[in-house]
Image (cartoon, grey):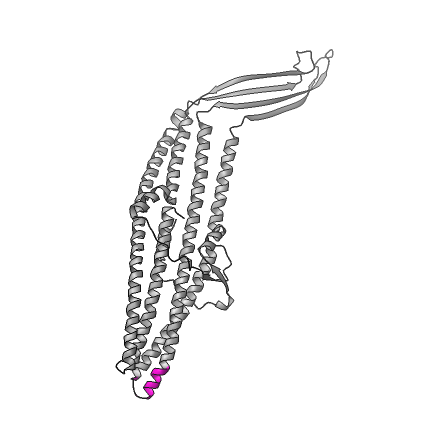
Amino acid sequence: MNLSKILCSFLVPVAFAVDAQAENLTEKKMGLEEIRSFTHQNREVIMERMNREIASENLSQRKSERLPDLLSSGDGYLSQKLPLTDDGKSSHAFRYHFNLYTEFDLYAGGTHSNAIERLKKEHQLSEERLKALEQEVNLKGYVLLYDIYRNMKYQDFILKSIQLREKEYERINQLYLNGLVLKSDLLRSKLYITDLQKDEVAIKNSIDILSDQLCALLGMESSQLVNPQLEGDLEYHIGESFDELFEYALMNSPELKIHRTSYEREEIVLKEIKSLQRPHLSLYAQYGVGSPQPYFNYKHQLGGEVGLKLSFKLSSLYKNKHKKSAQQVRIQRQATQLTDEEVKLKNTLFELYTRYNESLLNINRALEKIDMSKESMRILRNSYFNQQALLIDVLESETQSMQASFEWVEAVVDSQKYYWALKQICGYL
């Protein structure tokens, strides 16, 4: 699972591309529930579901191998004898034989049961991988949807800023013509509008790119512009402490479940190797019908037998020695890897939990900044109307007020992305 790549996208801006043809896109309203409902269409999920079906068929196939072996065989031939002397008599006859043979393992050293247990673990492993992948796809979808929401809010901020700047540019231009402000103030206002227009194109392309990525992730048509519906999905909060989350994650983390199952499978493989060094006891029976031998005087004969077979490969005592040692090392390696994954889980969980709490502080700071910017704008407006401040300062204050509002939205979005990342790594999703 590429959780670290997902986390890196939390606070890193999306790379901007050339202007997309938005008029060719159809709008698709989407919330978190819609993402969950479309997860089954993800191509990686589809392939992993196929792997699960393969594992299920392999398990069924191995179970069927415990059934008795049944073999039928037969032959027919024409027997002819030619005399070498004149007084001899020639003879010919058609002879046939048909046999039915069955054999059933009474004891195979645990070969069958261990193989079935191993395949059960492989089937369980495919189940855990499928669940982990579905949760990962959900998290990726959530992150992309929140990023689209954040970029759309940023787009609204830019559009409002452009409208404000264009409106106030005309007023500054009028003041410049009347000699009340400097030309540098007029040029500064025009340059600001130009920069905002460039940002507008970039953020519009970013929204198109994110929408395309989300549609591709969910196996949908890429010619759709996603419209996030997150009104009720912006106030999720973590109520557990770090220790509580870590304790739950140790038991339910998708990655740890996969590694534990892999470890248990390797232990069963070792049992399979040991079972090769044990005797093999089977029950067999055969029955047949055919033409009689020449020294019998009846036309057909029936016969059969039932018995026990006991066999033991002496070569298994020395041929499997190194295989057994190698498997023991694999088990030790798997145990070390499991311990390493637990340490990585704790580190990643601590990072997410710390960033989550940081985002909550950023929300409070953004709210304080909004209040301060509104008060500052009120004071500057009064000063401007009293001819005690330049109009450009009023514009800067209004921009700062909108910027503070966007910073609050960004902090809220970041907190929700960290929330879902914590849920995913702990196995809550």
Q: Name the residue at 49% across, 35% down.
A: 59
Pick whichever, 114 or 308, lies toward us: 114
Q: Is residue 5 above or below residue 153?
A: above
Q: Is residue 412 above or below residue 117?
A: below
Q: Which residues are magenta?
A: 170-182
Q: Name the residue at 46% across, 50% down.
A: 44
Farthest residue in the left direction? 388
Pick whichever, 250 or 408, lies toward us: 408
Q: Is residue 350 left or right of residue 157?
A: left
Q: Is residue 249 left or right of residue 282?
A: left
Whether residue 5 is visible: no
Pick whichever, 140 or 295, lies toward us: 140
Q: Is residue 194 above or below residue 138?
A: below
Magenta stretch contains residue 162 = no
* Number of disc labels: 0
Residue 19 sits in quarter? bottom left
Q: Name the residue at 34% across, 43% down.
A: 248
Q: Name the residue at 45% across, 28% down.
A: 111
Q: Is residue 364 left or right of residue 50?
A: left
Give x and y (percent) for residue 254. 39, 44
Give x and y (percent) for residue 60. 51, 35
Magenta segment main secondary structure: helix
Give x and y (percent) for residue 418. 35, 54
Pick whichever, 120 or 54, lies toward us: 120
Whether residue 423 is visible: yes
